[in-house]
Amino acid sequence: MGLFTRTFTHKKWVDAVDRVTAGGDNGFNVRFQALEVDLDAIGAALDSLASGVPKDRTINLAPQLTQSGVDGWVHALGSASKGAQKGGAYGVMAVALPTTGTIKKFRVLGSNTGQGSLQLELFRQELGGANRVAVAQIAGVHTDPGRTFDLSIGPATGTEGLDPAYSYFISARLDGAAPSDAVSITGFQIVCVTG
């Protein structure tokens, strides 16, 4: 059974017999109204089909990292930076993702002018009681020291599926930086396929 069943049937006019009118059973108004009903049904059927087509959804995030270690990240104007005279920075932030679909890409942007090790990771955590909580890394990047970065990575096999049974978060961990190093994170991006 299809999504659309035609209801309009054209009744042919006969020359010199039928009188073309706007009203009546065979008039233009009735015929065009029947065509409108069919066109509306076609539009609804097409909308229904289109709603099932997978779509890429890009989620851009400004770093808002909650301190999770000895030193936290310093936030200013939509970015997060290592604190002055600090050797590291540690933080996590929650991420709201769709409840269905798949994760396609995790992207991070920023700069690391020193020699510190900067690890940026996307995790999922199983919801539930204290005895059931399981954390798994979905994707992670390690930045090269001494440069600006724009890095993307796909999810680990088996972690790409979005599921309402999980919460999601990003971790940003900088270790071994010199006090004078400038390290900043300017954005996160997660691309999902939904629909």
Image (cartoon, rainbow, N blue to C red):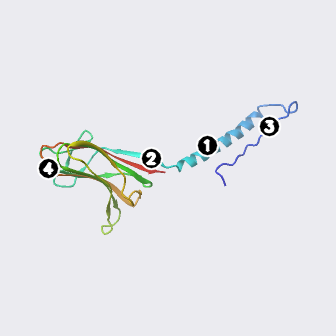
Mark 3 neighbour density, 10 Å: few (under 14) some (14–19) many (20 or more): some
**Residue at horizontal 61%, vertical 47%?**
45
Mark 4 neighbour density, 10 Å: few (under 14) some (14–19) many (20 or more): some
The disc labelled 1 sits on which kind of residue?
Answer: Gly
The residue indicated by pointer 4 is 87
Mark 3–mark 1 CB contact (< 8 Å) = no
42 vs 111, nearest the viewer: 111
The residue indicated by pointer 2 is 56
Local secondary structure at mark 1: helix
| Comparing labels 1 and 4, the label whose residue is closer to the camera | 4
Mark 2 neighbour density, 10 Å: few (under 14) some (14–19) many (20 or more): some
Mark 2–mark 4 CB contact (< 8 Å) = no
**Residue at horizontal 71%, vertical 36%?**
32
| Distance of label 2 from label 3 (alpha carbons) | 48 Å
The image shows residue 154, relative to residue 22, as above or below, that is below
Q: Position of residue 8 (x, y in %)?
A: 73, 43
| Comparing labels 1 and 2, the label whose residue is closer to the camera | 2
The disc labelled 2 sits on which kind of residue?
Answer: Asp
Observer able to see residue 127: yes
The disc labelled 3 sits on which kind of residue?
Answer: Asn
Q: Is residue 26 left or right of residue 124?
A: right
